[in-house]
Image (cartoon, grey):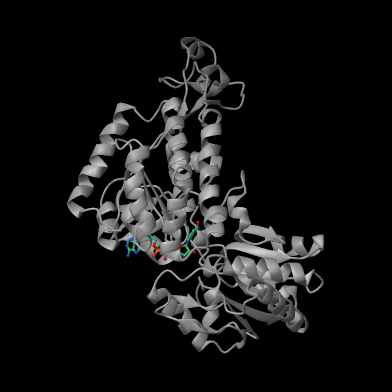
Amino acid sequence: MVFTYTPLEDIPAVFSDLQKTFRTGKTKPIAYRKEQLAQVAWMLRDHQQEWADALKADLGRPSLEADFLEINPAISEAKDAYDNVEKWSKTEKARWDMTWSVMKPQIRKEPKGVVLIITPFNFPVHLTITHVSSAIAAGNCVVIKPSELCPAVSELYAELVPKYLDSETVRVVNGDVPVVSKLLEFPWDHIVYVGSGRVAKIVAAAAAKHLTPLTTELGGKSPVFIDPNTDFELAAKRVLWGKLANAGQVCVAPDYVLIPRDAQDRFVEEVKKVYASFYPEGDPSKSDSFSRIITEAHTARIKKLIDESKGTVVFGGEANVQEKYVAPTLLKDVTLDDSTMQEEIFGPVLPIVPVEDVNEAINIVNDREHALCLYVFSNDPKYKAKVFDNTQSGGAIANETIIHVGATGLPFGGIGPSGCKTASVLKQSTIKLIILYTAGYLSGKYGFDILTHHRCTLDNPRWVDTVLMKGRYPPYTEKSTSF
Ligand code: NAD
């Protein structure tokens, strides 16, 4: 396989070609959108084995995880958009109002234009296809920029997208930082950026130059609260699975555990048992059920976190940088100043931070940046409500980890540093540019709405001037205020 980057000099034409097509209205008919969405699904289904092989080559992804966490959910997203695009794109009437309703106020659902979608390495199929499906359903032209850290998957996009989708409306651009930098020079009608907060700041600054709306889907340290009275066997199984899927390279992976100090060892014993049952041969490096880290550099970064940790290693701790292997690692008695508590781990390392009680755990979480998700294991409704009601995070999940990302109908996204949703002000030299960030809720109807312009319309009949608004024209008199 030869992985080819898109030449920088081709990029201006990619943008202008798509802009020209968009202006012809080609992407607007619902029948066209549905046909393209069906093609997205077929592109995955017809070549399911090739996608799985590419995921194996790039990420050492076990084939069950490829189907369960990537390809099937991606097909579902395309299918969900196919099934619902007609309903989602219907013009809506504004709510009834005595004065305004005579003017037929309506909200037209219009595509934004040409959308740039930049995605990360860890779920190169599911994440990319979810956003592409939303963009197509909303009637946009699309540029897909997959991660260069997944050469096999990115090359498959370059090969299959032109065969299955309309090249006048959907293009793949491959490459690393210079390619993204070139792409960011253009005035896209919306940018979807999924990846790290560090790069999101670069993308946001570039988007601000054109006042381009930007949606960010980022990461963070998603905490796990363990109620000492919960079912530890179940909690251990679901937390460890969520941590080890894709070797921890999941944006919503449980990052660390908060548990009352006197319950820590009991929980550790259950995690050890679950670990033994996941890898009965005793060596996950030989298992077909455990992925590799994406690059040697990321492997070295995670190894350093383990080596510098002051926590006690319960199991694991080994890493082989050349093999891009980090052993599943459980650390106990970890403190907040530990190396593993300073950044998103994004690897198969689970630190347990013992706390006094749930109140201390809540304070710890509230003192940190808002996470993409927060997990609670408890059978007590009051315990769950206490944690949910007194914290903030992108999602809040009880008695489960990571699978909510695929749940049909649920908005998925972050808050603040884990995914941007509010108006922000960026300082660019001496000029303050205000750009509208939208909620990182890119799935199903939520994704459709974000990549859709909700355009207001009115059609005011002549008689309104003689009855409802007769006093609005100058010269103003006392009676002018009567409308
Ligand atoms: P990354 O930010 O390094 O890369 C993402 C994309 O940005 C890639 O396509 C890459 O080509 C581009 N890029 C990288 N450096 C750039 C630069 N200097 N200038 C311009 N573009 C650049 O992220 P990653 O390492 O691929 O992915 C891991 C991160 O993504 C984690 O933080 C994870 O939590 C996050 N993530 C979030 C979600 C979500 O939906 N919230 C999903 C998956 C991953």
Residue 49 spot, x, y in % from top left: 46, 51
**Quadrant in which the N terminus appears:** bottom left
Residue 255 spot, x, y in % from top left: 58, 71
* Position of 346 relative to 49 (above/below): below
Ligand 1 visible in quadrant: bottom left
For this view, does 222 lie left or right of residue 249? right
For this view, does 254 lie left or right of residue 383? left
**Quadrant in which the C terminus appears:** top right
Going by the picture, which residue comes out furthest to the left?
Answer: 9
Residue 462 spot, x, y in % from top left: 46, 11
Residue 319 spot, x, y in % from top left: 48, 82
For this view, does 128 lie left or right of residue 352? left
* Position of 463 relative to 7 (above/below): above
Seen from the viewer's position, the closer of residues 470 and 56 is 56
Q: Is residue 423 visible?
A: no
Residue drawn at x 46%, y 39% is 42
Rendering quarter of residue 168: top left
Q: Is residue 15 visible?
A: yes
Residue drawn at x 42%, y 61% is 121
* Position of 315 relative to 289 (above/below): below
